[in-house]
Structures are given as C-alpha cells and as structure tokens.
Amino acid sequence: MSKIVLLHGFAVHLTAPIVRPAFGPSASMSAFDELVSTGEARVFPWGIAKRVKPWQLLNPLLIQQLYQDEYKLIQSLELQRTLQLFLEREKPSMIVCHSMGCSLLQNYLEKFTLPSSIKSIVLVQSDLAATKKLRTNVTLHHLYCPWDPTLLLSSLVSNHLRAGLCKSKQAGVNNILFPLTTFPNLHTSSICDKKLPEFVTRHL
C-alpha cells in the first residue's frame, strides 16, 4: 500500500531511440522519484506504448493521433475498472494527477466512488475543460499556471479553456498558482520540481 497514487499525463509511453528513452518508475513525474523508491508513492500506469523514429516526434499529426487515441482510452470502462482495483489495493490517502491524468480521474468519478482512504486530490496543470467539476467530496488542491504552452495549445484545439491555466471556480477548491520555470518543456516543469512533492507531503 502507498500513501500517494500518481496519475501521469499524455504520451508517457511514447519513446524514440536516444532522444526519448523510456521513463522510469515515476513515469515522467520525476519529482516523486524518492517517494516512489521508498514505496510512499506509486504510479498507476496507463497509456499507449508507441516507439517511433526520432524525427517522427516532430510530426504534429502523429502527436495529435496519439492524443486522440489516449483520450479514447481514458474513457474506457475497462481502464476505469483497472484504476478502481488499483486504488482499492493501494488504499492511498491522496491522488496526484497531471494533465490528461486529471481527465482520467474525472471520467472515473463519473462512474465510481473513491475508496474511503482517500482524503484529498491534487490536480496539476489539468487538461480538463475549465468548466468541468469533479464529483467528489474530498479536499481538492488545484495547481495552475497561465503560461503553460501545452495547455494553451490544447485550449486552441479543443476550443475550450483548459482548467490548468486558471483558478478553478468549483466551490471549496484550494487554488494555488504554481509557476512553471524549467525549459524546454514547461508543461512537465511542475512534475519535475521538488516543490511539488514538498507541497504534497505537507497536505497528506
């Protein structure tokens, strides 16, 4: 059992020789490496494994297709049931989700209830539409940043502002501006920032 369950985001299982090797046990959420190594945190692995040539990573059509395929995956009842079994086994007190992982959790909550062990959820740069509300009574911490380029692009493509760019209007949510500062990929800046697990452990 682990105190923290991590729901990673999109394209974690997309690899390319040399330039994009496979992620380790923290599945791109490297800020949690130490907590994962001690067993205090555990990743729920999901997503589509895809290995491509390095130059194919520059193909926006490939990335768009993978996004659509993984978006369909998080809506599948099979994946949501797998998450249910995982949560029941781990009995965590907190879920931390990043980007599309927030959408996976939202879809799960449409059909299932959380185990009673879970007391809080941390949403990091959520790729949900800003108008979406999570159906849960546990404490919600919403970490956002207005200059996330990936979520700005997602907003443009979907024609809906993404939640991770702004404060949540859901009642009772703890909104926290979490500045993204690390290049080249600002979207993953937060999940590589040691301030994130520090925040999480303070709120366990």
Image: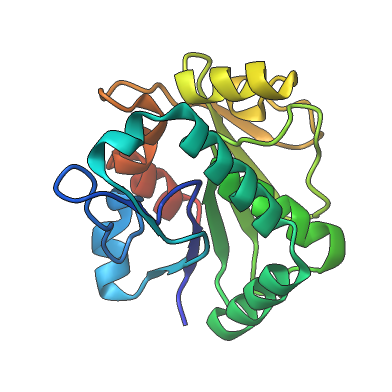
Instruction: Residue 34: name its quadrant.
Output: bottom left
Q: Looking at the image, is 81 positioned above or below residue 100?
A: below
Q: How many marks?
A: 0
| x 54%, y 50%: residue | 97
In the image, is 119 to the left or to the right of 90?
right
In the image, is 137 to the left or to the right of 68?
right
In the image, is 110 to the left or to the right of 158?
right
In the image, residue 121 lies at what x, y percent? 61, 52
Instruction: Residue 132: name its quadrant.
Output: top right
In the image, residue 74 lies at what x, y percent? 67, 57
| x 34%, y 36%: residue | 57
In the rendered image, the residue lying farthest to the left is: 18
Q: Looking at the image, is 130 positioned above or below residue 128?
A: above
- Can see residue 174? yes
In the image, residue 129 lies at what x, y percent? 73, 30
- Can see residue 123? no
| x 64%, y 67%: residue | 118
In the image, residue 126 lies at what x, y percent? 60, 36
Instruction: Residue 172: name its quadrant.
Output: top right
Which of these two is toward me, 47 or 131? Answer: 47
| x 67%, y 69%: residue | 79
